[in-house]
Amino acid sequence: ALTAIFDDCLEIVKDTQPFEWVVSLWPEQHSPEENHVGVKLIAKIPLDYPEVSLPELDVEILKGLTNDHRDELLSMAKEEAEANLGLPSIFAVCERLREWLADNNVKGMDDVSMYAQMMRREKEKEKEEQKAKQTF
């Protein structure tokens, strides 16, 4: 089923149990020129998945992100998998990561200078303020 969903973005590293899959995730799957950020989700699938165990997950940066972003995305991926314990969760994990990538598809996310970090915090603050205004 994942092969049909992710097409050429899914790489089956190991096709015997325990499986290992790698999914390349981009904000715009079909418009690569518009992508400033991207990651690979690496999933090792245990024999008793999804009934008992969670997949072993890792995230690798493909483009435009820092190690702090990687850690944030990995934490998000594990959180999503835990929320779906007992159910197949790879699609849900991929969608959560892709949403984050789409929301953060900005050139220069991998710039770790103090100025760039300050500007990103300002933009995030503005986004949060706009969301707060929309809820009222």
Image: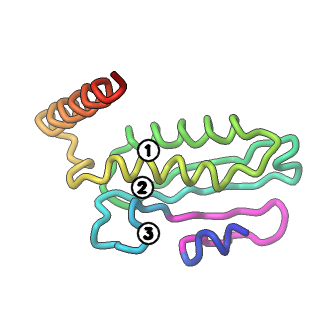
Whole-percent x, y for residue 105 in the image = 31, 53
Whole-percent x, y for residue 65 in the image = 33, 50
Please identify, in this view, whether the residue under mark 1 or under mark 3 is nearer the observer: 3
The numbered mark, 1 or 3, whose residue comes first in the sequence reads 3
Query: Which residue type does callout 1 highlight?
Result: Arg
Query: Which residue type does callout 2 highlight?
Result: Ile
| Figure quadrant of residue 113 | top left
Asked if residue 11 is among those painted magenta in the image, a careful observer would answer: yes
Residue 54 against residue 95 in the figure, above or below: above
- Does residue 35 appear left or right of residue 79 in this picture? left
- Does residue 17 appear left or right of residue 62 in this picture? right
Query: Which residue type does callout 3 highlight?
Result: Gln
Q: Quadrant of the C terminus?
A: top left
Asked if residue 87 is among those painted magenta in the image, a careful observer would answer: no
The numbered mark, 1 or 2, whose residue comes first in the sequence reads 2
Residues in magenta, as a range: 9-24
Q: Residue visible at 61% across and 35% down? A: 79
Whole-percent x, y for residue 50 in the image = 82, 48
Residue 23 against residue 45 in the figure, above or below: below
- Provide the residue designation for mark 3: 29
Q: Residue visible at 50% across and 49% down? A: 97
Residue 135 against residue 37 in the figure, above or below: above
| Figure quadrant of residue 39 | bottom left
Image mark for residue 88 = none
- Provide the residue designation for mark 2: 61
